[in-house]
Image (cartoon, helix red, strand yellow):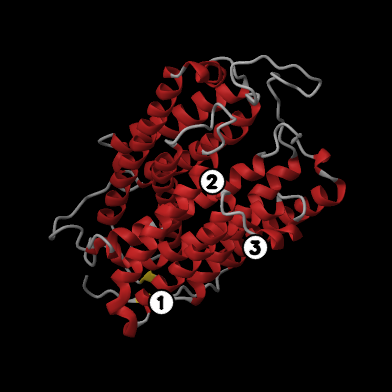
Amino acid sequence: MKNMVFREIEGKSVGYYVLLAGLALFTLLGLLAAHYMETNGHHVTGMTNQVVWGIPHVFAVFLIVAASGALNVASIGSVFGKSMYKPLAPLSGVLSVALLAGGLTVLMLDLGRADRVIVAMTHYNFRSVFAWNVFLYSGFVGLVAIYLWAQMEQRMKPYTKAAGVAAFIWRLLLTTGTGSIFGFLVARALYDSALFAPMFIIMSFSYGLAIYILVLMAAYGWTGRPLGDGVLLRLKGLLAVFVAAVLYFVAVYHMTNLYYAEHRAAEHFILVDGGVNTQVFWIGQILLGSVLPLVILFHPSAGKSRRSIALASVLVILGGLAQMYVTIVGGQAWPLDLFPGMQQSSSFYDGVIHSYHASVPEVFLGLGGVAIAGLIVVFAIKVLRLLPDSLGDDVVDVHHGAKAVAKPA
């Protein structure tokens, strides 16, 4: 890299303060929604004692998974030695911590008794995946902080790769732990699968990179800094690979469940007659979140348009939320199999498919987590030197001087 100078943004424009105000407003609405649900009880939400994880958990898990993937850009540069990604690394690290903070805030406020998180922090059941995640999440923040320090402090440059490798391994463990929450719940037919761990890892790559692309385009577009075609098209190509990999793992997961007789009824529910769950799966997750982005990204013309790349990234994010909805809500909608191979009967909804209708406070709580992540990033790029002055093609050598050309939006 030549002439690479990192500089914070001025952040004095009206647009910057409007953006801050908008994010702060949604953060406040999210906090008010959490307060409303806690003071009135969870009966004001769409959740029941059968579907105990609703839309807030959809947002929370999505943000946590995306946090791991957002760090992938930095890992490619320092761990795998790809020089083009090195100037992109500081923003990658801050974005990953911001997304994790937003997701964990929603998760904590959705517990109903947020103060009880102290119990989870002081009393551990190490046979529980949730207990593991307390250490995985806090360890991730600590390692990324060290990683950022190594990137941004000249004296720490020799330790950048070591810090990057540690953060890379830790984030794989983090996403494995998040996926294992579902994979280890053997009583639920739609969760009981070891594929959740690797599938969540590749999902994190896809979601995190889609968010990173949008943040990068917005940061450079709104501040008037050059963002070259070479960088954008390289990130676009990587996103297409990750989206295709997610689609592959989803197909393998459902084909595996269809192979096992004990899971066929649950699979039929999700794939054929699950009502809104089936619609969200086929329309939201598969069509809009996977197939359409792949068509856009691989199209010889649309794949070189900045607007199309941004649209594909938005669709990947929406598809990720749809996938989390099907996984979390759809997985709970199918009744528990408490006694495999036996019939059971009681007055407590045994064998009954459960319904869920999200309430307005739940939606605002989830959006509040997104706003918290946005506030952290918007404030960080104003006070820290996270962005190079230019990522133009004349500054960034994509690969040995080869230049990629993109059509203007």
Residue tagged 3: 121
Task: Single out the residue that lies furthest toward the bottom.
Answer: 155
Q: Quadrant of residue 394?
A: bottom left
Q: Which mark is residue 11?
A: none
Q: Are marks 2 and 3 in contact (CB under 8 Å)?
A: no
Asked if residue 309 can be seen in this view, the reply is yes
Front tag of 2 and 3: 3
Determine whether the residue tagged by mark 1 lies in a helix, strand or loop.
helix
Asked if residue 212 can be seen in this view, the reply is no
Tell me the amino acid under the disc marked 3: Met
How far apart are the two marked residues, 2 and 3, measured between alpha carbons?
22 Å
Residue tagged 1: 149
- Crowd band around label 1 with a 10 angstrom C-alpha radius: few (<14), some (14–19), many (20+): some
Closer-to-camera residue (246/15): 246
Q: Are marks 1 and 2 in contact (CB under 8 Å)?
A: no
Residue tagged 2: 62
How far apart are the two marked residues, 1 and 2, measured between alpha carbons?
27 Å
Answer with left or right where residue 295 lies relative to residue 395. Answer: right
Front tag of 3 and 1: 3
N-terminal of the pair, mark 2 or mark 3, is 2
Location of the N terminus by quadrant is bottom left
N-terminal of the pair, mark 3 or mark 1, is 3
How far apart are the two marked residues, 3 and 1, measured between alpha carbons?
27 Å
